């Protein structure tokens, strides 16, 4: 395979070449009204329909010449490597809720599985009634539908569990317990899959909290990092330091966001649709602020005073003004469409973006501003609170 695009992402809008998606699978069938809140879904998706919506999303991307890689396929291929298998199993059974007896049982039982069966268990989890004769008190005291290995329904949102910064794969460290294990899997893929041989990794699943939905490459060398419910200040600081050391960025903007579910990541508030334009949730646009971080000559961080996000961003990007696409919506419509990921668009090149069709008004305003909006269905996909940007991890974009 000679014509694989070179991995690397330096902007939000450079022509998209390769993207990693996760087609929703059996992990979504584990959601019940009793566990959906802790598993971070706002309802119970109709899984077959969610898959159909996701297939249509992938088809749109392929139709535009984008190579689509699936996380589950990469994981299965990765697990053909004995060292990767061993590492996956070791990490999975460290959970202290298991106890030693069950841990030993699981090491053997998981070790007996082929790569695709093991991948399936790592993604969809394992229920108590799916094991037998373990001799474990934990199993004896569990309800049949208690999980021994939790399912990972939020794998769907590949944006969060890794993010490319330049030519480096950044393994993130997820804040919510329901998602912690996802990055063990992405780290494994980047470490062992032949496709990523030679790719250097930064950060790590067990590091300061950082989620990909908070990281926006505003321009080459300029990162904005949302700091709120998910990414913590220490995670942003670590990313800034690493990016400066490796010459992957010259400026990082730390952007405080409300610690609310509606604004869990910076990309729920704003996404870039052109080299100098963003669609932004207007209810926060006037008060979104940023702290500019730069390296000094000794590699220490210089932290500038907080200012308005748009001013800080334009200066860092070296442009006169970062255009806000004026969605001009009344505040209630804006709030509804923001909740349904209207601001969470995926640019596949400058001025071409994929968006959920349900956000009719936001999409109309984008079109008025000269953005080609490719609308996709997301009635089921959206129940996990994530849009086209959340559901995609760009692996290769052309330089601008
Ligand atoms: N980049 C994003 N906005 N991702 C959305 C993730 C949604 C997911 N249910 C969570 O709560 O974590």
Image (spheres, helix red, strand yellow):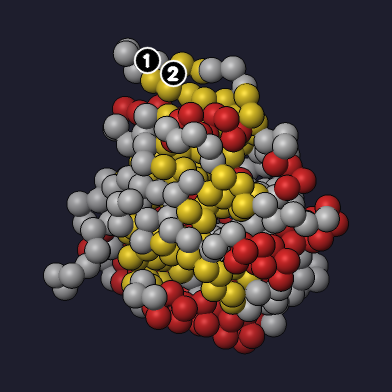
Label 1 secondary element: loop
Residue 201: image quadrant is top left
Is 72 positioned to the left or the right of 372 in the image? left
Q: Which mark is residue 374?
A: none
Which residue is label 1 attached to?
Answer: 296
Does residue 179 lie above or below 154 as drawn?
Answer: above
The percent position of residue 82, horizontal first and vertical second, equals: 27, 64
Question: 86 or 199: nearer the eye?
Answer: 199
Is 307 positioned to the left or the right of 142 in the image? left
Residue 99: image quadrant is bottom right
Which residue is label 2 attached to?
Answer: 301
The percent position of residue 6, horizontal first and vertical second, equals: 23, 58
Residue at 51 percent of width and 18 percent of height: 303
Residue at 49 percent of width and 34 percent of height: 320
Residue at 59 percent of width and 39 percent of height: 226
Visible in this render: residue 200?
A: yes
Question: 90 or 189: nearer the eye?
Answer: 189
Query: In the rendered image, which quarter contains the N terminus?
Result: bottom left
Does residue 346 lie above or below 280 as drawn?
Answer: below
Visible in this render: residue 359?
A: no
Does residue 152 lie above or below 65 as drawn?
Answer: above
């Amino acid at each position: 395979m000679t014509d694989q695009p070179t991995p690397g992402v330096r902007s939000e809008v450079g022509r998209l070449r390769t993207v990693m998606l996760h087609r929703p699978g059996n992990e979504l069938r584990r959601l019940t009204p009793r566990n959906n809140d802790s598993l971070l879904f706002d309802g119970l998706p109709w899984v077959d329909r969610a898959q159909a919506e996701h297939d249509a999303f992938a088809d749109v991307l392929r139709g535009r010449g984008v190579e689509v890689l699936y996380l589950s396929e990469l994981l299965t291929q990765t697990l053909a490597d004995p060292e990767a298998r061993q590492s996956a199993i070791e990490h999975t059974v460290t959970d202290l809720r298991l106890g030693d007896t069950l841990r030993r049982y699981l090491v053997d039982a998981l070790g007996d599985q082929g790569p695709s069966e093991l991948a399936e268990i790592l993604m969809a989890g394992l229920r108590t009634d799916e094991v037998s004769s373990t001799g474990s008190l934990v199993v004896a005291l569990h309800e049949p539908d208690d999980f021994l290995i939790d399912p990972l329904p939020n794998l769907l949102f590949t944006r969060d569990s890794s993010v490319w910064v330049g030519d480096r794969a950044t393994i993130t460290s997820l804040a919510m317990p329901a998602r912690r294990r996802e990055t063990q899997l992405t780290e494994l893929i980047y470490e062992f899959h032949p496709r990523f041989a030679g790719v250097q990794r930064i950060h790590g699943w067990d590091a300061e909290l950082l989620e990909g939905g908070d990281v926006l490459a505003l321009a080459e060398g300029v990162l904005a990092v949302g700091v709120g419910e998910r990414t913590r200040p220490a995670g942003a600081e670590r990313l800034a330091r690493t990016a400066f050391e490796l010459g992957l960025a010259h400026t990082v903007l730390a952007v405080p966001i409300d610690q609310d579910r509606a604004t869990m990541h910076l990309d729920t508030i704003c996404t870039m649709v052109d080299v100098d334009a963003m669609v932004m949730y207007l209810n926060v646009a006037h008060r979104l602020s940023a702290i500019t971080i730069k390296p000094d000559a000794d590699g220490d961080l210089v932290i500038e005073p907080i200012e308005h996000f748009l001013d800080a961003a334009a200066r860092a990007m070296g442009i006169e003004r970062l255009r806000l696409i004026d969605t001009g919506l009344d505040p209630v419509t804006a709030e509804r469409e923001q909740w349904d990921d209207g601001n969470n668009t995926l640019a596949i090149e400058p001025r071409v973006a994929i968006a959920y069709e349900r956000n009719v008004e936001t999409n109309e305003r984008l079109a008025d501003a000269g953005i080609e909006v490719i609308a996709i269905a997301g009635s089921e996909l959206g129940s996990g609170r994530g849009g086209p940007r959340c559901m995609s991890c760009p692996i290769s974009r052309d330089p601008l």
